[in-house]
Image (cartoon, rainbow, N blue to C red):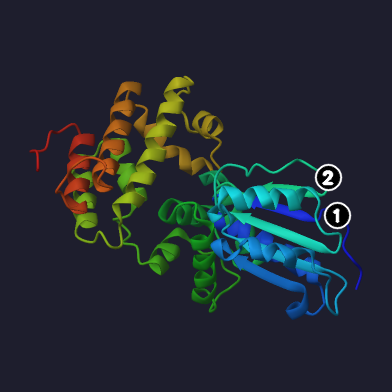
Amino acid sequence: MKVPPPPFVWVLYGQDEFRRSQRRKALVEALIGDGPTDFMLTVWRGKAFTEAAFPQLYELPFLAPHKVSVVLEAEALSKTLLKTLTQYVEKPAPHGYLILDFNQESAPAFPKLSHVQTESFSPPKPREAIDWVLQTAEAESLVLSPEAAALLVETLGPDLRLLYETLRTLKVYRLSAPEAPLTPTEVGEALGLHPQYSIYRLIEALAAKNSSSILQIGAFFAEDMRNFPLLQILWHLRQFFQNLSILHLSGTPARAEAIQKSLRLRFAFQAKPYEQALKHYSLSACGEALTLLRETEARLKGVLPSRQSEAQLLQGLLLQLMGARPLPLL
C-alpha cells in the first residue's frame, strides 16, 4: 500500500456536525485504503485521550505502512493536554496520521504549518441548505421540485443530518414513481404536515397581518407543541424578521425580483412573503418583533423567570406580534 503524502495532521472544527463527520470518515477511508483497519486505526473520544495515549502516536505500525489516529470530541481536552498535543502537531511521527475533531465554533490554537491542514465546517445558511438538499437529492436519485426543497429547509431548518435522514425517508416514500418530482404537497404529507397549518403558512399570515390565520395556526401549534417545538418556531420567525430588517436597511423596494437579489434567495417564490411584509412592517416594527422573540426564548430557557408553558409563550408572542397586549401570566 502506498503511503499518502502530507499533511500528517488534520484539524476539523465547526458546529456543522454532519459535514464534519462526513469529511472525517472520508479521510479515514482514504488513509486506510485497503489496509488492515484493526492494525492501522485507533480512535479516542474526548477525555479518553490522556497523557498515557501519546506514546501510541509515536509507536511504529504493525503489519501496515502507517497508522491513523482519530481524536473525537477534542474540545473536551484540558488546556494542559492541548498544550502537549500542540507539541506533537508541531513535530508529528512520520509514519502516523492524526485527525482532530472539535465540535466548536472557533478554530483551535494550533500552529499553521505545511503538514497541518485546518478545515472549518460552519452551519449552512438557508440558501446554502436548499442547494445542498437539491444536490444530495440528485445524488440519491430523488427528484425534488425547488418548492419542495425550500419547504424541507423551512420546516426542518438547516440541520444537514436531519435533512439527509429525511431525504432517505422520502426516497423510500417515492419508490412507486422515482422519476416524478416530489411536490411540496407530497413532501408535506410525508412529513405529516397539515396543508393549512405549517410554519410557512404562519409566516405568510404574519407577512399579510392576517389576524384570523395567525390565531388559527397558533392555536393548532399550541395543541401539539411536541411536533411544533417553540424553539424551532422562534428560529424561523427570527430569520424572517432579520431578513425583513435587512430589506429595510438596504432600501430594497417591495418587488419580488429586487427582494430575491437582495436576500440572495434561491428561488423567486421565496420572496413573496417579504413582498407582502414590507407593506405592513416598518424597520422599528421589525426591531420590536426581534426583541419579543429574544425575550420569549429567554423565558423558554429560564433566563427570564416565567411559569408559562410553551403553548402559552407561543400564543402570547403571536398576540404581541399582531399588536395586541395579552394579559400578563406569572
Foreground: 158 or 7?
A: 7
Mark number for residue 30? none
Residue at position x 83%, y 45% from top?
114
Q: Is residue 309 above or below residue 29?
A: above
* Residue 285 percent location from the top left of the image: 29, 25
Q: Which residue is mark 1?
A: 6
Q: Is residue 13 visible?
A: no
Please give left or right for residue 198 compared with residue 6 in the image: left
- Which class describes the residues within 10 Å of circle 2: few (<14), some (14-19), or many (20+)? few
Q: Residue 37 sits in which quadrant?
A: bottom right
Where residue 256 appears, x then y in whole percent? 48, 33
Q: Secondary structure at mark 1?
A: loop
The C terminus sits in image quarter: top left
Percent position (x, y) of residue 287?
33, 26
Q: Is any atom of residue 47 visible in this view?
A: yes
- Relative to residue 175, is residue 96 drawn left or right? right
Foreground residue among 170 and 143: 170
Q: Position of residue 71 (x, y in %)?
A: 64, 61
Above or below 280: residue 183: below
Within the image, what quadrant is residue 210 found in? top left
Q: Quadrant of the N terminus?
A: bottom right
Residue 321 shown left or right of residue 176 in the figure:
left
Instruction: Classify residue 5 by image quadrant.
Output: bottom right
* Amino acid at pointer 2: Ser
User: In the rendered structure, which amino acid carries the disc numbered 1?
Assistant: Pro
Alpha carbon separation for disc pair 2 and 1: 8 Å
Query: Up-down: is 134 above or below 256?
Result: below
Q: Element at badge 2?
A: loop
The residue pinned by badge 2 equals 114
Q: Residues within 10 Å of mark 1 (few under 14, many from 20)?
A: few
